[in-house]
Amino acid sequence: MVQSVKVSELVTRANLEVYAGAEYLKQRQITVSDISRPGLELTGYFNYYPHDRIQLFGRTEISFAKKMMPEERLMIFRKMCGEDTPAFIVSRSLPVPPEMLQAAKEANIPILGSKLATTRLSSLLTDYLEGRLAERRSLHGVLVDIYGIGVLITGDSGVGKSETALELVKRGHRLIADDRVEVYEQDEQTLIGEAPAILRHLLEIRGIGIIDVMNLFGAGAVRSDTPIQVVMHLETWTADKNFDRLGNGEETMQIFDVNLPKITIPVKIGRNLAIIIEVAAMNYRAKTMGYDATKTFESNLNQLIQQNTLEDEAAEADQANDSQSNSATETGPDKDGGQA
């Protein structure tokens, strides 16, 4: 888990302009992802001032500050300059009050700017910081983007995860991470997976060693991160284990508080795992779009059973009618007019 983000990294990521304090960009650290818009603080209310957050000034805050007396503005901005305040950011390329420049210079706090609207800028900063500062878990597996679906391939060591990923890359899909996958929770329903920096774009193939996928297959064969949507677990086939044959099992894997659908694929000599996983990903996407082949099969099976039942009932009815006709013939009058 990343404990902090340097302000200099935020400047690069959000394409921010540096109005003042460029020499402090690498010194100032951001430790929380929340952004503060100091509206109440401009009125002098500092009881719950979040001094450890980025202070974002939009049109409302700058317009309000203009109506204040210079001495009052300087006093307020000085109170906003906490020891752990990362930076002041002004949106919409609005002019920076000179009192803000003075107070920030005294406290060694950088002042940044952006052309973006305040709400959009706040969303951009929050998303980036949440991703960088979120709790992370390291999982053993391979993460591949297959037709836009993030597939986490798991299984015991040596089962063939990396070799399968290599075949998928050759088939035009993209590698995110091999061996170790760093996972963090973007929101209550979304998990993001990425590779550790030391393993980025690298793939280990037993007998060959480490290969650089980006160097061998091009930039289109890799991706930095992707949402994880389904888990495909490779398990060695054994005769005593029952594997799902119809696809109506609903197995899941929980990571953080998110339950991901899990598909167990038996590994056996002669099976092309890359094609099987590719088709499984396509079938999963079809299910999310409302088409389920298993339900179609079950519907066809029920119709067949119903049809066979009707045919059996009709045959039994015909047989009963034939029996009644034969009984009537046997008990009818003989040719001499007497009873048989």
Image: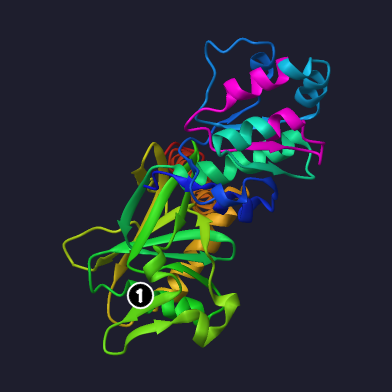
Q: 265 or 19: which is nearer to us?
A: 19
Q: Residue at x 65, y 18 (%)?
A: 75
Q: Residue at x 38, y 55 (%)?
A: 182
* Magenta span: 72-101
Q: 139 or 115: which is nearer to us?
A: 115
In the rendered view, would you say 230 is above or below 135?
Answer: below
At mark 1, the secondary structure is: helix
Count of all numbered marks drawn on residues in the image: 1
Residue 130 visible in the current orientation: yes
Residue 221: which quarter of the image? Answer: bottom right
Q: 100 or 199: which is nearer to us?
A: 100
Instruction: Judge left or right: residue 327 versus residue 41.
Output: left
Residue type at mark 1 is: Ser
Task: Residue lying at the far bottom in this picture: please name it.
Answer: 208
Bin the neighbour count of mark 1 within 10 Å (Cα to Cα): few under 14, some 14-19, many 20 and up.
many
Instruction: Judge left or right: residue 74 versus residue 10.
Output: right
**x, y percentage for residue 177?**
42, 66
**x, y percentage for residue 82?**
51, 27
Residue 46: which quarter of the image? Answer: top right
Q: Residue at x 50, y 43 (%)?
A: 28
Image quarter (top left, top right, bottom left or bottom right) of the C terminus: top left
**x, y percentage for residue 328?**
48, 39
Give the residue number, with chain letter if any, for mark 1: 162
Colour setup of the view: rainbow
Residue 109: which quarter of the image? Answer: top right
Q: Residue at x 83, y 16 (%)?
A: 67
Q: 95 or 282: which is nearer to us?
A: 95
Q: Is residue 262 magenta?
A: no
**x, y percentage for residue 249?**
37, 48
